[in-house]
Image (cartoon, rainbow, N blue to C red):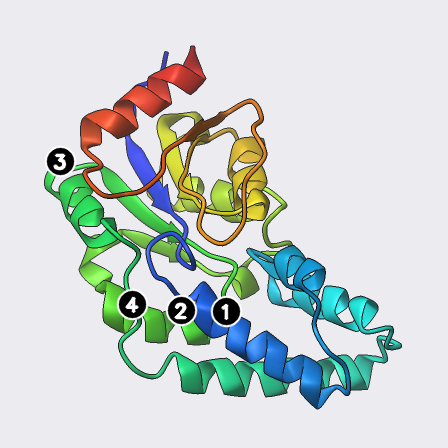
Amino acid sequence: MPALTAVLWDMDGTLLDSEKLWDIGVRELSVELGGEMTEEIRHALIGSAAPDALRIIFAGLGLEPDPAAVAAAHDWLHRRVTELMAGPIPWRPGAKDALAAVRAAGLRTGLVTNTTRAITELCLDTLGRDYFDITVCGDEVAHGKPAPGPYLRGAELLGVAPEQCVAVEDSPTGSQAAATAGCAVLVVPCEIPVPERAGLVFRDSLVGLTVEDLRAAHRTVAA
């Protein structure tokens, strides 16, 4: 059984309570496109990379995904979310203490997010760059979550095998990506439930999370 060597953190909805800011952006985009976002569409967007999110929005609103229209929608959403993320972003409960505990224990750490690099840099102003050895963003891999590529890239950059990692996630999309990559996954749901599947260990909150809790989750999945 490989020892736990690294922790790979999701960002939106896991460390930062930023899904609520994305919610504002995508709902306003729907209005801009002439439609109204249903809860079903909104839930399908949680954890998605930008290209997938735009496909879901256009399909949900019954719009033809003309490349020029999709590109314009992408630019509009990027500008709006950049505005929303410009100030301090609320933390998820317990997240800052959990980051500090992992750092103090000497484990390798990475941030693995479907959010673009430009917006992630704004979020890092709140998170603190010193908490992470590496960061992987959605526009830096060929396919974002739920594909395993972001987590495989994170492990590669840290110089460890995915089986030596615990990924901390909040969404079905991210959990699937991390588990498919071979990581043990600690799931702390935020906006929507995450279905149970092999490779996932569940927890209600990051409040009180210890490194031993992460090691226990890793052992449970490895066994």
Q: From the image, state whether disc 1 or disc 4 is nearer to you.
A: 4
Badge 3 density bin: few <14, some 14–19, many ≥20, Cα 10 Å: few
- Residue 39 visible here: yes
Q: What amino acid is found at the position of numbered circle 2 in the picture?
A: Thr
Determine the secondary structure under disc 1. loop
Which of the 4 quarters of the picture holds residue 209? top left
Q: Disc 2, disc 3: CB below 8 Å?
A: no
Residue 120 image label: 2
Q: Are marks 2 and 1 in contact (CB under 8 Å)?
A: yes
Q: Report the residue marked by disc 3.
A: 105
User: Dot 4: within a 10 Å radius of its alpha carbon, few (fewer than 14), some, or many (20 or more) residues?
Assistant: some
Tell me, for residue 90, which label it has, or none.
4
Residue in the image at 22% along x and 49% along y: 94
- Type of residue at label 3? Ala
- The answer to whether the residues at label 1 and label 3 have Cβ atoms under 8 Å apart is no
Relative placement, left or right, of 129 versus 153 is left
Q: x, y (%) of residue 179?
A: 53, 32
Q: Residues within 10 Å of mark 1 (few under 14, many from 20)?
A: some
At label 4, the amino acid type is: Pro
Residue 117 appears in the rendering: no
First in sequence: mark 4 vs mark 3? 4
